[in-house]
Amino acid sequence: MSERSLIVEEQAWEALEKSIIYYQGRPIGTVAARDADIAALNYDQCFLRDFISSALIFLIKGRNDIVRNFLEETLKLQPKTGQLESFKPSRGLMPASFKIGSINGREYLKADFGNHAIARVAPADACLWWIILLRAYVISTQDTALVERKDFQEGIRVSLELCLVTRFDMYPMVLVPDGASMIDRRMGLYGHPLDIQSLFYAALRASIELLTPNQENQNIIQAVHSRLDPLLKQLRENYWLDSDRLNVIYRFQVEEYGEEVLNQFNIYSDSIPFYRLAKWLPEAGGYLAGNLGPSQLDCRFFALGNLMAIISSLADEQQSHKILNLIELRWSDLIGHMPMKLCYPALEDMEWRIITGADPKNRPWSYHNGGSWPVLLWMLTAAAKKMDRGELAHHAIAIAERRLIEDHWPEYYDGPDGRLIGKEARKYQTWTIAGYLLAKELVLNPTHLKLITFET
Ligand code: GLC
């Protein structure tokens, strides 16, 4: 390892240690960011999705206590009753974040289910990440006693019930409002966004491993099994975009009625940016579209959903390679000066105005709208290593390493090529730090991939 690499890693570890939150004397999570120069807002809280990167690196380093404490304490925050009460978090919902409060000198955990968040967005990804992390914990520690506990089994069950419940929906995907994931602002992601579907698929696969086959779990296990196949089929077929698929969509019939129709979603050819895509999408590349619904196929590329699709084997072998080919062949668009773009391309002009609600934080090529997020480095590394394409990971890590330490570990970067530190980016953002450490570790010792990957 180069001397520079060593220095970057050493500083990253130091910064990660400082981000740990202690509750009643025990480590239970990490704060989102430690930036003294900008108002903390809720960045001084532990976000469930942000903690995943920290948790995985802690597991790899044998710091199991913090992950166990996190899983136990967040489980206690999850409502187990109250399905029909309004203005209360739903049964099974996991909070987006929590912080430590104190009454008469006694500490307690205060959860935010979206009831305090900007725009009051509730997280759909938190319970999915929680299940995925629980599986990683069990694989890493072999502590099956924890997952077999009644409260843990119940926690998995109620999360799944929340996702599997029949709503006003005819699809196998999970139906969520806009802003229900890492992209927690309006970005045209209402309905069936890929980022959530990839996590949903991984969480369903994880649940099969985690649920004890007994009387109490019988129905839910059955429900998971019967959802997995149609979900997989729908995602692999109807979200998939490559040259062949573009040809099919281009000539789609519309207004078809019945069970066997090809254009199930009634996608109108004119809604697809064919000429841009035909130029951009290399013959050897492909990816899963960002969202799918009635007369809607969102052709933006979303990194988290696509990378997690590779990691979870939601994408088949050929699709996984095509996604990586796309990243390799469109490197300057998707990686540029900082791995990697959260979504591509940015919404601009009228589209930005209408779809984001003219959100200035998400103006074109900034933040969620075409900004670059270093946390994605670990997912890119895991996906590339899983498919034996390690050179992509090495190359991306080398790019990140050149800047992260000098720039003080920003939350995100701006600009079409990711050259600018994000306009409102926090510095010392924990998942940037942990994501870098995790990427390095996965390259050094790919056996750790088993914590997060699923077999085909
Ligand atoms: C922002 C991000 C969200 C993240 C949070 C804390 O709200 O959009 O994904 O969890 O910051 O870092």
Image (cartoon, grey):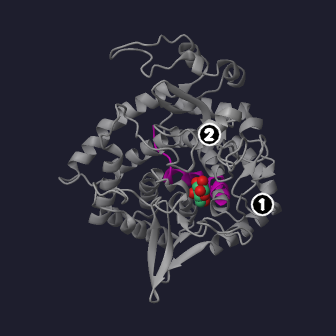
Front residue of 14/77: it is: 77
Q: Residue at x 57, y 49 (%)?
A: 185
Q: Which residue is mark 1?
A: 5
Q: Which residue is mark 2?
A: 388
Quarter holding residue 158: bottom left
Q: Residue at x 39, y 45 (%)?
A: 205
Label 1 near ligand 1 (CB < 8 Å):
no
Front residue of 8/351: it is: 351
Residue 401 sits above or below residue 281 on the image: below
| Residue 437 located within the stretch drawn in magenta | yes
Q: Amino acid type of disc 2?
A: Asp
Question: Residue 87 appears at what percent x and percent y?
Answer: 37, 58
Residue 269 sits above or below residue 58 on the image: above
Q: Earlier in the sequence, mark 1 or mark 2?
A: 1
| Residue 439 located within the stretch drawn in magenta | yes
- Residue furthest toward the bottom? 104
Span highlighted in magenta in the image:
436-456
In this orientation, does residue 63 appear? yes
Q: Residue at x 77, y 55 (%)?
A: 401
Does residue 365 appear to the left or right of 81 in the view shown?
A: right
Marks 1 and 2 sit apart, C-alpha to C-alpha, by 23 Å
Neighbor class of circle 1 (other Cα within 10 Å; few <14, some 14-19, many 20+) is some
Question: Residue 263 appears at what percent x and percent y?
Answer: 45, 17
Say which quadrant the N terminus sits in.
Answer: bottom right
View quadrant of ligand 1: bottom right
Q: Secondary structure at mark 2?
A: loop
